[in-house]
């Protein structure tokens, strides 16, 4: 009897455990209030899948919109065509690969120059040489064009000035007259993502404030209103992304003033610092000692420091006197940093207000990437940060993302879409995408 009682207790316990077991239900994928049957993506290099200093097939295959589109297909999304390079020309424009590290720990990057999709070059009077790539003639849903600014979406000759855009158009340069805005809206679509605007600040920043200009915020606002108004004119829904703080990326935060000075002082302890030609106001520049607030670009050849420079006062060491400051193109000085950040903040104010006026979802890339830089990010137990190479998010050019970084961004877009439209697009598995490829 005692044995039987024990069994009663055991059975009762099992029933109790069963009754208390949490009822975990996986939400069923659904499209909510959005129609994903033809999703198009609009943007620049980040949208195209650019990475490691180039556009190539492997990067295109891991672009964030292609990842988003794959997940959308579980809730009624349609085919998503990208203007892929073919396998014989898989290396596209060429790109950088990691060959190893120096004894001091600096990465050894080598260019990939085989199996390119370059078909020639054209000289554009008053502009310069434009590299032309093998034409793509199939259907397109990914309209990402490396280098394009919001400023250029209505500029009819742009198809002759950007080889990545020229390869998508039916005519050969210099005969193109199709503005980007007309090109992307030529066929019906039901949903869009838009991540234009980065290059309206980034091009100025990466040139050290010397080779480009920041887009005027009022012009940016007018064009963003035009773009979003056109995209939503026939009822399409969509998601837009804000412009990241372009001064926060590894391109500006890997080679530092402190590290350069420390290196020079190992050979010559009397050196006080390096001189730069810094913005004073307007277009006035003057030499001064660099501080930690001045950002050195990733591509600065530090070996130039101290090499003799011919001056009216005789040969002087590069970067170590006010007569031989580091060239502007290698430094985004403190005032230029402030200008860039102010423009990005103005751009994002426009992007958010225009999106709100049209009822669109917003992925706040500015806040997200700044948080990643400040606090890091953990995804499925794996840590990420904004460190160059080691951080796992940014590719070898220090500007664009790794496939894993693009997967992380794709999930941010998906979360924004789900929150706005009541859809339930499943997130992608970030671990399935690689980071920087090591030799």
Image: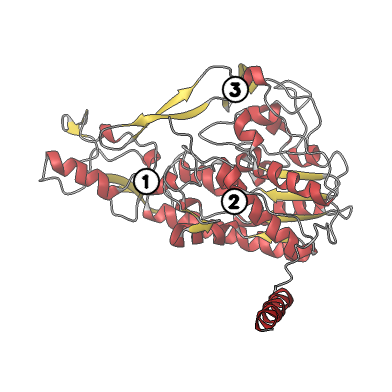
- Judged left or right of residue 332, residue 273 is left
Quarter holding the N terminus is bottom right
As helix, strand or loop, the secondary structure at mark 1 comes to loop
Which one is closest to the eye, mark 1 or mark 2? 2
Q: Quadrant of residue 426?
A: bottom right
> What residue would you read off at disc 3?
131
Residue 408 circle label:
2
- Judged left or right of residue 184, residue 48 is left
378, 363: nearer the viewer: 378
Quarter holding the C terminus is top left
As helix, strand or loop, the secondary structure at mark 3 comes to strand
Q: Position of residue 26 (x, y in %)?
A: 75, 62
Q: Position of residue 5 (x, y in %)?
A: 69, 83
Cα gap from disc 2 to disc 3, whole angstroms: 32 Å
Residue at point 74%, 24% (across, down): 136
Q: Residues within 10 Å of mark 3 (few under 14, many from 20)?
A: some
Q: Is residue 201 above or below residue 148?
A: below
Residue 254 circle label:
1
271, 16: nearer the viewer: 16
Mark 1 or 3, nearer chain start: 3
Q: Is residue 177 above or below residue 379?
A: above
Mark 2 or 3, nearer chain start: 3
Q: Residues within 10 Å of mark 1 (few under 14, many from 20)?
A: some
Farthest residue toward the front?
1
Q: Quadrant of residue 265?
A: top left
98, 221: nearer the viewer: 98
Cα gap from disc 1 to disc 3, whole angstroms: 30 Å
As helix, strand or loop, the secondary structure at mark 2 comes to helix
């Amino acid at each position: 009897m005692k044995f039987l009682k024990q069994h009663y207790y055991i059975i009762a316990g099992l029933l109790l455990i069963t009754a208390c077991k949490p009822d975990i239900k996986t939400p069923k994928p659904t499209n909510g209030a959005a129609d994903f049957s033809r999703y198009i993506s609009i943007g620049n290099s980040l949208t195209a899948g650019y990475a490691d200093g180039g556009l190539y097939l492997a990067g295109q295959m891991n672009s964030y919109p292609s990842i988003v589109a794959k997940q959308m297909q579980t809730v009624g999304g349609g085919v998503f065509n990208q203007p892929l390079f073919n396998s014989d020309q898989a290396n596209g424009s060429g790109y950088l690969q990691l060959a190893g590290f120096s004894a001091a720990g600096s990465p050894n990057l080598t260019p990939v120059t085989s199996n390119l999709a370059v078909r020639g070059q054209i000289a554009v009077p008053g502009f310069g040489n434009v590299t032309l790539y093998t034409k793509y003639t199939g259907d397109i849903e990914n309209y990402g064009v490396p280098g394009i600014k919001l400023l250029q979406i209505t500029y009819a000759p742009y198809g002759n000035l950007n080889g990545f855009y020229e390869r998508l158009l039916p005519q050969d340069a210099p005969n193109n007259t199709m503005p980007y805005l007309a090109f992307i809206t030529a066929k019906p679509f039901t949903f869009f993502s838009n991540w234009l605007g980065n290059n309206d600040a980034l091009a100025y920043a990466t040139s050290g404030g010397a080779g480009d200009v920041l887009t005027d915020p009022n012009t940016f606002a007018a064009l963003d209103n035009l773009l979003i108004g056109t995209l939503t004119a026939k009822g399409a829904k969509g998601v837009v992304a804000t412009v990241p703080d372009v001064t926060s990326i590894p391109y500006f935060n890997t080679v530092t003033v402190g590290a350069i000075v420390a290196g020079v002082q190992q050979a010559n302890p009397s050196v006080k610092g390096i001189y730069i030609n810094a913005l004073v106001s307007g277009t006035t520049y003057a030499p001064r000692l660099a501080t930690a607030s001045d950002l050195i670009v990733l591509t600065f050849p530090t070996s130039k420091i101290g090499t003799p420079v011919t001056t009216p006062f005789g040969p002087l060491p590069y970067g170590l006197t006010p007569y031989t400051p580091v060239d502007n193109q290698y430094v985004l000085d403190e005032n230029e940093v402030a200008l860039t950040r102010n423009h990005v903040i103005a751009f994002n104010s426009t992007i958010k207000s225009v999106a709100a006026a049209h009822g669109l979802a917003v992925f706040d890339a500015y806040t997200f990437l700044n948080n990643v830089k400040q606090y890091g990010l953990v995804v499925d137990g794996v840590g990420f940060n904004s460190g160059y190479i080691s951080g796992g998010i940014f590719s070898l050019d220090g500007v664009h993302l790794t496939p894993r970084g693009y997967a992380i961004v794709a999930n941010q877009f998906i979360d924004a879409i789900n929150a706005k439209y009541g859809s339930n697009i499943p997130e992608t598995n970030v671990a399935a995408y690689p980071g920087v490829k090591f030799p």
